[in-house]
Amino acid sequence: MASLRLLLYGGLISIIATAFPVGENTKKSSIALDYYLDDVVPTHYDIKLITYFKRDEGKNDTYTKFKKDEQSRYFYGEFNATIDIIHPTTKISLNSSSTIYRYSGELIENNANNIRHFVEKFDYNNKTQICDLYFKVEVPRGNYILNIKFFNAINVAEDDVIFFKTKYITKLESKVWSNATDFQLIEAQRFFPCWDKPTIRTTFNISIKHHRNYKAFSNMPIRQEEVYKPKLHNIETNMQWTHFNTTPAMYAHLVMVILSPLLHRSSTNRIDMWHRSYCAEHIKFAQRIANKVMMKLKFEWFKKLEVPKLQLVAIPYFRNDTNMNFGIVIIRETNIIYDENVHSVAQKIEVARLVARGVAYQWFGNLISPSWSSYSWLYDGLTTLFGMDALDAVNALEDYENSGMLDLFIVQQYESLNSYGWFLTELLSEASSPSEIDLFSSFFRDVKGKNQ
């Protein structure tokens, strides 16, 4: 085992030294990342998002105008972005999605003059996923507020990356029924136009209006929830506003919004765990592990977290083991619950491993620039390794004097390389558009003896 550890750490040093070659593929890289080039630097976003569902109240003329079909979910949005224009220009380019309908925009000088420049035309390129905003006259350099109002119609049947339906049993007053539920996981570029630049991090202030039967999540904890009351009638509706804390400076591609049926919260000083109420007893092990790993990484390895609280969200029948993001980690419900009367030790190991990895990711997540998407496997591997090391240090499997989690991890990865080696693709690939970044997130993981 000692030799395997030396092999692992030696390989880690070699990978870090060789994974970032200087001078190779420079021409290819510059061509691939042309879609990022712009003369505009954003510094802050104020975003308001309104969701529409079949039972929602207050659907307005905007919804009626853009409504396409019953298979779509609709979002009305508005954002004010504080930007610096470096060079005079008649065009501003943003990353966007083909589902977003841009129907108004203006640029306001951020000074006492408040001079307005209206967008004359929106031009969207499906291949590069770039939306160009054209102005009638040249806009001088300076500080501005860019206001854009838009409508987003995402087809549920065609875009199952964002939407999926699941059925699960809910108990209330001794009655049991099956409830078809929508779960929405939306990344920044999918729900509002933005600058997804590889070198720029900005702050985001996000507010969402949604049905009260849903809970909204984002990268930051909830600052305030308020029932929506129309100004003319001042009466309560089934809609509410959820306002989130402003994020630290972060890359736009890390911004995420989640809408899910109401969940129960188990909270500590460092972590909020969201789950169905019946899971409360069975997520205590995961919660204990998460707190121990966070304490280990925070006080012995790294600096303080940039987010005030980490959010772990357990979703029934989630398609992946986990979806890790800066400030928020989504885990399939069955992968985070542990009942010692029902589950094997393998399940205990799996819960500890996934939770530790999600916590460790928080120290890496905001370091991953879109231009480094080709190296996401390296961050994934380092996150997993440090998570296992933290588990080993805190004796996460509390029944044992020495958990041996790191040793187990090394053996599993060694066996996985032998098992999957024929299927591996080249480690370094260039992204030529934002959509290709998602292709580099695959990473083989294996726990021997896990119950299926």
Image (cartoon, rainbow, N blue to C red):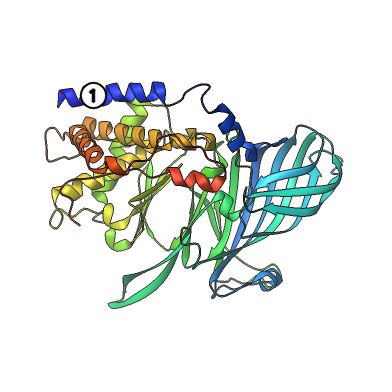
- Nearer to us in this view, 155 or 248: 155
Left or right for 346, reference 314? left
The residue where tag 1 is placed is 7
Whether residue 70 is situated above or below residue 328 in the rendered picture: below
Q: Position of residue 214 (x, y in %)?
A: 47, 64
Q: Position of residue 21 (x, y in %)?
A: 47, 23
Q: How many marks?
A: 1
Q: State the image quarter where residue 386 is shown.
A: top left
Q: Is residue 258 visible?
A: yes
The image quadrant where one finds the N terminus is top left
For this view, does 402 lie left or right of residue 356? left
Q: Residue at x 49, y 68 (%)?
A: 157
Q: Quadrant of the C terminus?
A: bottom left
Q: Label 1: few (<14), some or many (≥20) within 10 Å?
A: few
Is 14 situated above or below 385?
A: above
Q: In the image as oriented, which residue stretches furthest toward the front?
A: 422
Q: Residue at x 24, y 56 (%)?
A: 281
> Vertically, is 281 above or below 55?
above
Camera sees residue 52: no
Left or right, 274 with reference to 220 = left
Point out residue 323 in the picture as x, y percentages from the top left corner. Answer: 40, 49
The three-letter code of the residue at mark 1 reads Leu
| Towards the viewer: 214 or 392 | 392
Give the percent coordinates (x, y) of residue 325.
44, 44
**35 with respect to 87 (left or right):** left
Residue 314: which quarter of the image? bottom left
**Label 1: which secondary element:** helix
Residue at 47% from the left image edge and 47% from the top image edge = 438
